[in-house]
Image (spheres, rainbow, N blue to C red):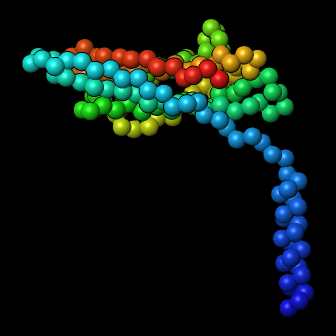
Amino acid sequence: MLRRTMSALALVAGLLAAGLAAPTHAAAAQTAQVRCEVSGGGSLFNPPYDYWIDAYATYDSVPGNPGFRQWTGYSFRLDGVVPPGDQSNVNIRLYDGNVLIFAWNSPDNIHPRVWYAVHQGGIHYTTTSAVDDVVSFQAIFDRPRRSDPNCTTRTPPV
């Protein structure tokens, strides 16, 4: 019994030591969640609407190279007091200062009240020399048989 207890303690000590000695990696960061809202209508032939998009992006440091940031994902959700139709679309742009790094246009099939995650085209890199990386999200809300309102929001610079 004592032998098994000592073996178990040695195993636990070994696992703890291995875990403490393992290299650590900083966790991914997330931009502030941003929102834009558009509303209008209110007549007999143009019913009122109030739509919005909530969005954020995730990024991480580049292991071994602190001068760069890697962008790993973009998430968004469309919603409204009365939800938009199911043929809305979203356009995403990543900028390093004034330089466009990544552009993605969704097909016209974005449904309301669903979180979407975009990991299209691999990882995108920006420099960390200035606090000027922003992600722009433009939502075009589907209104069947009516003009489609839109709005654009940008994350705060990181």
Give left or right: position of 47 versus 88: left
Image location of residue 50, percent across then percent down: 28, 25
Looking at the rendering, which quadrant does residue 69 occupy?
Answer: top right
* Residue 125 visible in this rendered orientation of the protein: yes
Does residue 145 show up? no
Name the residue: 87% across, 59% down. 18
Residue drawn 59% across and 30% down? 31
Judge from the rendering whether residue 10 lies leftward or rightward of residue 126; answer left or right.
right
In-front residue for pair 154/70: 154
- Quarter of the figure that contains the N terminus: bottom right
At 60% from the left edge and 25% from the top edge, which residue is drawn?
A: 121
Residue lying furthest left: 44
Is 47 displayed left or right of 76 in the figure? Answer: left
The x, y position of residue 40, in whole percent, is 24, 18
In the depicted structure, whether residue 43 falls above or below residue 51: above
Vertical order, 15 against 144 (above or below): below
